[in-house]
């Protein structure tokens, strides 16, 4: 029987005894388990709308749960949707931690131990005694059945209160319904299986924490889930060309990166700045698999691929071999943004050649065209049963690369015109509008006030997501309005630019939508080795970059 042994504090009931310090820093992982590499992902095929799962078999043979004590009734969330007749309905429950935690996965053994207030053997990953579990009151009964144990030291609250506890402390692992997962917390994988993200499972029947909640319908299961993998700058010249073509490593070389570690720093980049040396540790192809697994994959293509290209070993001019665009297609890139300050490096003809090659490969593009009008046109994509419009603009000189009447080039950023384009896309039926501005200052993660102002104006006009570029450093991200985010820069992805350590790093933004709502953000840190991105462990060498993102993002996010 569930017994309330602790006092009710601030609307929270404690099952068993526990002590929770909500002032602890959230930078440490709640439970230090290794992240699962994306190479272990499921099929890259987009998810189909879930089918009814009412026939799902129970995952536990434990005795039926005791009724939730009456004092907890007032803590229940607003009444969920009730199935006719109160028939058993599957409900995915999800472990969550602080957004900035480096933890990505937890085991069922650890969850069971936390629920029962026990530690686990070192072989299963130690559970620090200071870590506690917080669960939604509505789910206590099903969790008792699932774990086959009574809770001890478990905080019981509404789903919103559980999220608040998780956001306030690194020492809390929450459990809420998938319906209640939001972007400001991190949903964990269980035993390496993910319910959110590009490499998620596509059959919720195999989710390890699926419980029966009679009479309750999950809106998560009834709404299509879809993902975006957004990468930073891609340049197909210099080391990328040298490795792929001259060294005969093939057109997929740039996308075959796996996992890596940082070995050491060495001298020197520009101005004596240190550079980083990394080495690959395995999982070849994990980067490409991450992009292929997403429903939509988007990058900023910062080199033209003209018919008459020229290899550049050094310098500021980039032109790539169009054969290397096959690598983008093989990696599942759905759209390339072309509005940037290098797309004109081969002149107007180079812009047109690049567009032609992308068209032949079936890769959509935005931000460049035969003239100003075509350069401003939205590219249209589809995912999750929704229509997605993508617009791209360049705010960086040289303006001679900008399209004009009778001249091919990139779409210049003019705020009044951008706002009109966003509104026009919404009017034309776009469920989601993504804007890709090439803006800001190079080699810094500081954001200009003008960028913040423009982002707010674009979101007010109807933009749902802003994916910026140009700085060659990963910049901060902000929630411009509820559910509407701006990523100021995702840094370099496929590139060869040894200005400083930060130009050798990037992130892939792994974004999960349920319907039109962005519910999860996972930032995968990368390090570039000979032009090729490789994934860093968020709890290892990737932690330094993630902490830099946190430092610049927290003032506006308040997460």
Image (spheres, grey):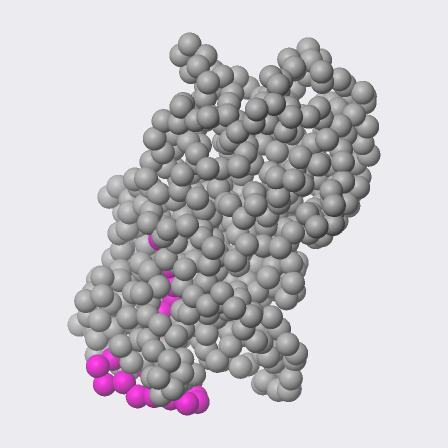
The secondary structure that dominates the magenta segment is: loop
Viewer-side residue, 326 vs 23? 326
Q: Position of residue 500 (x, y in %)?
A: 58, 79
Q: Position of residue 422 (x, y in %)?
A: 33, 49
Q: Which residues are magenta?
A: 296-319
Q: Position of residue 77 (x, y in %)?
A: 58, 21
Viewer-side residue, 173 vs 60? 60
Q: Is residue 204 visible?
A: yes
Q: Is residue 146 magenta?
A: no
Q: Is residue 314 magenta?
A: yes
Tell whether 435 sits left or right of 110: left
Task: Classify residue 54 by image quadrant.
Answer: top left
Q: Is residue 547 above or below residue 234?
A: above
Residue at 49%, 65% (x, y): give it: 283
Residue at 36%, 34% (x, y): give it: 50
Residue at 55%, 81% (x, y): give it: 499
Q: Position of residue 306 (x, y in %)?
A: 25, 80
Q: Quadrant of the N terminus?
A: top right
Q: Is residue 26 visible?
A: no
Viewer-side residue, 269 vs 293? 293
Task: Classify residue 64 by image quadrant.
Answer: top right
């Amino acid at each position: 029987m569930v017994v309330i042994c602790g006092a009710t504090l601030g609307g929270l009931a404690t099952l068993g005894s526990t002590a929770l310090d909500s002032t602890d820093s959230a930078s440490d992982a709640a439970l230090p388990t290794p992240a699962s590499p994306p190479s272990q992902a499921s099929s890259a095929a987009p998810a189909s709308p879930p089918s009814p799962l009412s026939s799902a078999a129970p995952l536990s043979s434990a005795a039926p749960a005791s009724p939730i004590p009456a004092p907890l009734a007032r803590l229940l969330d607003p009444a969920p949707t009730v199935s006719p007749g109160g028939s058993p309905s599957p409900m995915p429950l999800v472990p969550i931690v602080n957004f900035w935690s480096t933890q990505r996965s937890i085991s069922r053994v650890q969850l069971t131990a936390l629920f029962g207030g026990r530690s686990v053997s070192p072989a299963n990953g130690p559970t620090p005694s200071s870590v506690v579990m917080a669960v939604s009151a509505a789910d206590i009964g099903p969790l008792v059945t699932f774990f086959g144990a009574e809770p001890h030291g478990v905080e019981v609250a509404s789903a919103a209160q559980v999220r608040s506890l998780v956001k306030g402390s690194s020492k809390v692992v929450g459990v809420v319904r998938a319906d209640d997962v939001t972007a400001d917390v991190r949903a964990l994988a269980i035993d390496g299986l993910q319910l959110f993200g590009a490499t998620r499972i596509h059959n919720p029947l195999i989710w390890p924490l699926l419980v029966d909640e009679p009479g309750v319908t999950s809106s998560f299961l009834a709404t299509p889930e879809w993902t975006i993998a957004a990468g930073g700058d891609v340049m197909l010249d210099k080391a990328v060309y040298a490795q792929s073509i001259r060294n005969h490593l093939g057109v997929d070389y740039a996308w075959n990166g796996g996992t890596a570690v940082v070995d050491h720093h060495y001298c020197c980049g520009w101005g004596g700045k240190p550079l980083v040396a990394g080495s690959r540790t395995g999982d070849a192809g994990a980067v490409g698999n991450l992009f292929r697994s997403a429903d939509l994959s988007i990058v900023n293509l910062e080199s033209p691929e003209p018919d008459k290209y020229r290899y550049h070993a050094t310098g500021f001019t980039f032109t790539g071999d169009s054969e290397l665009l096959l690598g983008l297609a093989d990696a599942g890139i759905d759209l390339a943004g072309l509005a940037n300050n290098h797309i004109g490096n081969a002149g107007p003809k180079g812009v047109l050649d690049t567009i032609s090659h992308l068209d032949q490969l079936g890769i959509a593009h935005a931000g460049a065209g035969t003239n100003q009008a075509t350069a401003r046109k939205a590219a249209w994509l589809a995912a999750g049963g929704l229509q997605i419009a993508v617009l791209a603009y360049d705010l960086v000189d040289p303006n001679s690369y900008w399209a004009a009447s009778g001249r091919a080039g990139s779409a210049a950023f003019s705020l009044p015109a951008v706002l009109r384009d966003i509104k026009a896309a919404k009017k034309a039926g776009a469920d989601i509008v993504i804007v890709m501005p090439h803006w800001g200052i190079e080699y810094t993660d500081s954001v200009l006030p003008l960028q913040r102002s423009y982002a707010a104006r674009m979101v007010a006009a109807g933009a749902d997501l802003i994916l910026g570029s140009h700085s060659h450093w990963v910049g901060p991200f902000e929630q411009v309005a509820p559910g509407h985010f701006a990523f100021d820069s995702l840094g370099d992805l496929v590139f060869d630019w040894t200005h400083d350590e930060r130009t050798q790093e990037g992130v892939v933004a792994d974004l999960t939508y349920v319907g039109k709502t962005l519910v999860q953000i996972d930032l995968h840190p990368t390090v570039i080795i000979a032009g090729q991105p490789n994934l860093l462990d968020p709890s290892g060498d990737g932690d330094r970059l993630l902490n830099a993102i946190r430092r610049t993002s927290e003032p506006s996010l308040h997460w």
